[in-house]
Image (spheres, rainbow, N blue to C red):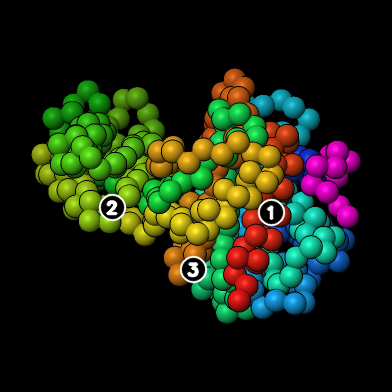
């Protein structure tokens, strides 16, 4: 029987992970990643289907004796970031890197595929969902729209994410909401271009964008109950091509994170007022879009308890009293109509600038064993818990 702590097996999984890290692909472009996953599943003799919702893959494992089912999900996409590391497996694609650890999530799901395929101590059906396009929030919805749950009926779903800064071998499993509803927004201010030495003859979108950043930062402290949690972040500014010209347009892009849908609607309405008001103040025209399609991940109690039991059986030290994360994950759409749980597993101490979404990040291969053990345990427990 293949064991998830076998050093030779884990080194093989780590090689898979490093290969994926060296060959990252952006959301919706995961063709080679999907081909690699498909090749490894084929080598294991595991039946699977490709091309679901884009580059999504679902592998099906079955043992007779039960009609229960469970799904395990891992995301595959990378980010548009120039990697700053210099190790042997650094990205070979300039401007694209696995800065969030999806290479580790994919490798762990391949690893548990091998473990469960070799194990005889479970009955039922396990679906391994290799999901594309998590970073832009479209992958889960695309797989569902392509008939994911019609083709692969799944009673419960489980997913996980690595967290740099927490000791490897630790896990956090929430009671209630675990991750926020995410959404991006973008604003374009269109003015009148002119010489930078004659600003009075222009309608300056750069200055308008600068004031908008400050104004947006005032929304949460002055419009949201301090007991609620909301994040509005301006993360990208674009405008201008030369120092002696005021351009005719400028763009501001950012993210919005909330837990309460009523608060979310109120904040979006206030953002619209601020965007329009600032535009009027500076005599520019506003063109904007606020994406409000994200969802909160909220573990169901029974599945949260199963995740805890599985984590402890895997030797993980479990915490249940941590605050929810303001980060988002479209795993929320997968569990919108069925129960499930999402946990965080420590990636070890942050080395240098190795935080999530940072150019210095790298997944810690020491986490692969605990993650694979947890995935195997939670699948088996879920199948037993669901039996009638």
Q: Nearer the viewer, mark 1 or mark 3?
A: 1
Residue 50 is drawn in which quadrant?
Answer: bottom right
Image quadrant in which the N terminus is located: bottom right
Q: Where does the image place residue 345, in percent across and percent down from the top left?
A: 59, 40
Q: Where does the image place residue 81, in percent across and percent down from the top left?
A: 56, 37
First in sequence: mark 2 vs mark 3: 2
Q: Nearer the viewer, residue 19 or 108?
A: 108
Q: Secondary structure at mark 1?
A: helix
Using a 10 Å C-alpha cutoff, classify the residue at mark 3 as few (fewer than 14 neighbours), some (14 to 19) or many (20 or more). Answer: few
- Asked if disc 1 and disc 3 are in contact, CB closer than 8 Å, the reply is no
Q: Nearer the viewer, residue 37 or 238?
A: 37
Q: Is residue 177 above or below residue 321?
A: below
First in sequence: mark 1 vs mark 2: 2
Q: Secondary structure at mark 3?
A: loop
Which label sits on residue 377? 1
Q: Residue at x 32, y 48 (%)?
A: 258
Q: Which residue is mark 3?
A: 338
Q: Which residues lie in the magenta part?
A: 1-12
Q: Find the residue positioned furthest to the top.
A: 352
Is residue 4 covered in magenta? yes
Q: Residue at x 33, y 37 (%)?
A: 234
Q: Where does the image place residue 196, in percent across and percent down from the top left?
A: 25, 26
Q: Nearer the viewer, residue 6 or 256?
A: 6
Q: Residue at x 71, y 59 (%)?
A: 34
Could you tell me how far apart the alpha carbons at marks 2 and 3 are, in whole angstroms? Answer: 20 Å
Which label sits on residue 214? none
Q: Which residue is mark 2?
A: 260
């Amino acid at each position: 029987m293949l064991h998830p702590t076998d050093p030779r097996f884990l080194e093989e999984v780590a090689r898979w992970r490093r290969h994926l890290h060296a060959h990252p692909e952006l959301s919706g472009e995961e063709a080679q990643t999907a081909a690699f996953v498909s090749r490894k599943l084929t080598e294991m003799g595991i039946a699977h289907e490709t091309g679901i919702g884009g580059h999504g893959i679902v592998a099906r494992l079955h043992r007779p004796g039960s009609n229960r089912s469970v799904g395990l999900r891992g995301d595959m996409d990378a980010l548009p970031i120039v990697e700053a590391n210099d190790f042997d497996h650094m990205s070979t694609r300039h401007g694209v890197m696995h800065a969030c650890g999806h290479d580790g999530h994919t490798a762990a799901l391949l690893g548990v595929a091998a473990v469960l395929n070799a194990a005889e101590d479970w009955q039922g059906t396990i679906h391994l969902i290799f999901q594309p396009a998590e970073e832009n929030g479209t992958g889960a919805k695309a797989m569902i729209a392509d008939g994911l749950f019609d083709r692969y009926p799944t009673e419960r779903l489980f997913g996980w994410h690595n967290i740099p800064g927490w000791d490897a071998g630790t896990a956090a499993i929430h009671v209630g909401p675990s991750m926020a509803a995410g959404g991006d927004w973008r604003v374009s201010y269109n003015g009148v271009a002119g010489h930078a030495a004659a600003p009075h003859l222009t309608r300056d979108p750069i200055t308008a964008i600068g004031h908008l950043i400050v104004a947006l930062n005032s929304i949460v402290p002055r419009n949201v109950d301090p007991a609620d949690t909301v994040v509005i972040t301006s993360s990208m500014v674009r405008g201008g091509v030369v120092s002696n010209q005021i351009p005719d347009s400028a763009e501001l892009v950012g993210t919005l994170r909330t837990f309460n849908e009523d608060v979310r609607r109120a904040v979006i309405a206030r953002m619209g007022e601020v965007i329009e008001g600032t535009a009027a103040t500076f005599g520019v025209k506003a063109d904007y879009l606020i994406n409000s399609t994200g969802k909160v991940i909220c573990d169901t109690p029974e599945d949260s308890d199963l995740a805890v039991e599985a984590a402890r059986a895997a030797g993980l030290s479990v915490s249940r009293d941590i605050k929810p994360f303001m980060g988002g994950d479209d795993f929320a759409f997968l569990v919108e109509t069925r129960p499930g749980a999402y946990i965080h597993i420590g990636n070890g101490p942050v080395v240098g600038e190795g935080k999530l979404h940072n150019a210095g990040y790298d997944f810690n291969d020491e986490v692969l064993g605990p993650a694979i053990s947890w995935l195997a345990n939670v699948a088996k427990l879920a199948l037993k818990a669901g039996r009638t």
